[in-house]
Image (tube, grey):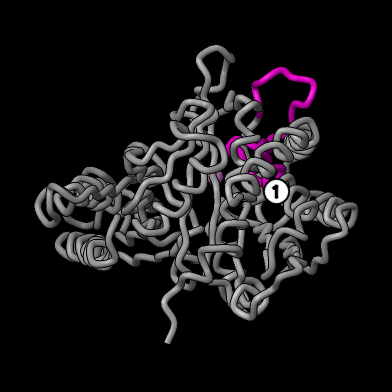
Amino acid sequence: MKDSIYQKVAGLAQQKKEQVILLRRDFHAHPELSLKEFRTTQKIEEELDRLGIEHFKVSETGVIGVLKGKAKEKDQVGDHAVIALRADVDALPICEANETDYKSQADGVMHACGHDSHTAMLLGAASVLKEMEGDFSGTVRFLFQPAEEIGAGGKIFRKEKERTLADAQRVFGIHCAPDLQSGLIGVTPGINNASVDHFTIRVQGKSAHVCIPEKGVDALYIGSQIVAALQGIVSRETSPVEPVVIGVGRFEAGSAYNIIAESAELEGTTRNVSKENREKVNRLVTETAKSIAALYGGSAEVEWEDFALPLINPAQICQEVSQVVDLTLGEGHVKSDRVVSLSGDDFSEYQEEVPGVYAYLGVGNPKVPGTQNALHTVNFGIDEDALTLGVSAYAAYTLWWLNEGYANLPRQ
Ligand code: NI
C-alpha cells in the first residue's frame, strides 16, 4: 500500500520529463549571474503560479514556494511536518562553447554548474507534489536560492530562516555530478564538500632600484616566500589523513624589471573538511603572511571572505533518502561512497539549522557526448534523461518525510 504512493511519484515524474527538460533548456538559454537572477526568478514565479502554488520573495532574486498537503485522514502530528527542498538558480561568468539550440544567449554567462537543471527538477517535483496534495499532510517549502556561486545566497536565506526554513525538520537538496553515471544518485554519509574561504594578502614594501636592495623592501620577494611557505601549513601543521588545500591563484607585483616592487597582492582559497582545521589553517595563513613580511622589513594585511561551511551529511538521513529511492525506483540507483570533493556548496548553511542531506545526481553518460565534462567548464553538459530521477527523489523523500518519517520522530 505504502509502496504504491512511491510508484505514483515515479510515474508522474516520468510524465513530466519533457516539461522538465524544456524548463531546463529555457533556464540554460538565459543564464544569469549571482544576485542578478531576475528573469530566472520571474520564470520560477510564473511556473509556480501556473501550478497553483503560493510563493513569496526573499531578497530580490530568491523565491520560496509553499505547498500544504490536503490528506483527509490528517493526524495532528503529520500536520506539523515540514520539509524544505532547495535548488540553487544562478550561473557562472563562463563563455559557453557547446553548440546546441538552447545554447546560452547571454554573453559570457553560462549554466556551467547545472543550476538550470536543479531549478527545473525542483519545479518538476513541485508539479508532482501539487498533483499528489491529497496524498499527504504537512508542508513543503521549495527554496529557489540565488547566488550559490559567490557563497552569498545560503547566508541570505539562513538569515531569513523564519521565512525560508520555518519549522522545517528536514532539508534536502540535489546537485549534478558529471563524474557519476546517469541513473545513479550519490547519497554519501559524512563529509561531502569542503569549507571554502577566500583570502587576499596585501604586502607593503618599499621601492628602490634593484641594484640597491638594501635600501628597499621587496614586496615581490616577500610574496614569493609567502606562496612557498603556505604549503608548509598543509604539510607540517595539519594531519596528513585530513584533506586540506591552500591554493594561491593570483599574484601581482612590480612595475618594471629594474625596480623593487613596492607592493604585492595575492589571492587564494583554503579548503577544509572540519571546523577545527578551518579555524587553524586560516589563522596560520594570516600569521605566516604577516611574519614573513615582517622578517624582511615589510608588512602584510590579510582579508578573509567566508564562502561556505564544510558540507557533512548525517548518516541516518542518508539512510532515509536511500531507502526512499529504493522504494520509488527499485534497488541499484543509490551510490553511497562518492569520493569527497574539496569544492564547496552553501547548502551547508541550511544543515547548520535543520538536519538534512545533499545528494549528487549522476548526469554523466559515456553514450551522450560531453556529459562527462567537469563542472565549471565551457563545454559542461548533462544527460537530460537523468533529471527524472532527481524529480522522483525530491518528491518521494518529501512524501516519505511528511507521511512516515516525521511521525516516527522521538517525542517528549
Ligand atoms: Ni553548483
Q: Residue furthest front?
A: 1
Can residue 200 be seen at all in this image of the molecule? no
How would you rate the neighbour count of disc 1 (Cα within 10 Å): few for under 14, some for 14-19, many for 20 or more?
Answer: many
314 to the left or right of 212: right
195 to the left or right of 224: right
- Relative image position of residue 96 (x, y in whole percent): 66, 27
Q: Is residue 297 above or below residue 36?
A: below
Between 281 and 18, the one lying in front of the other is 18
What's the residue at 58%, 14% (across, down)? 369
Ligand 1, seen in the image, is in the quarter at: top right
Q: Residue furthest left?
A: 236
Write the start and end of the magenta stretch as one range. Answer: 96-123
Q: Secondary structure at mark 1?
A: helix
What's the residue at 74%, 40% (across, down)? 12
Between 399 and 45, the one lying in front of the other is 399
What's the residue at 31%, 53% (across, down)? 190
- Relative image position of residue 327 (x, y in whole percent): 52, 43
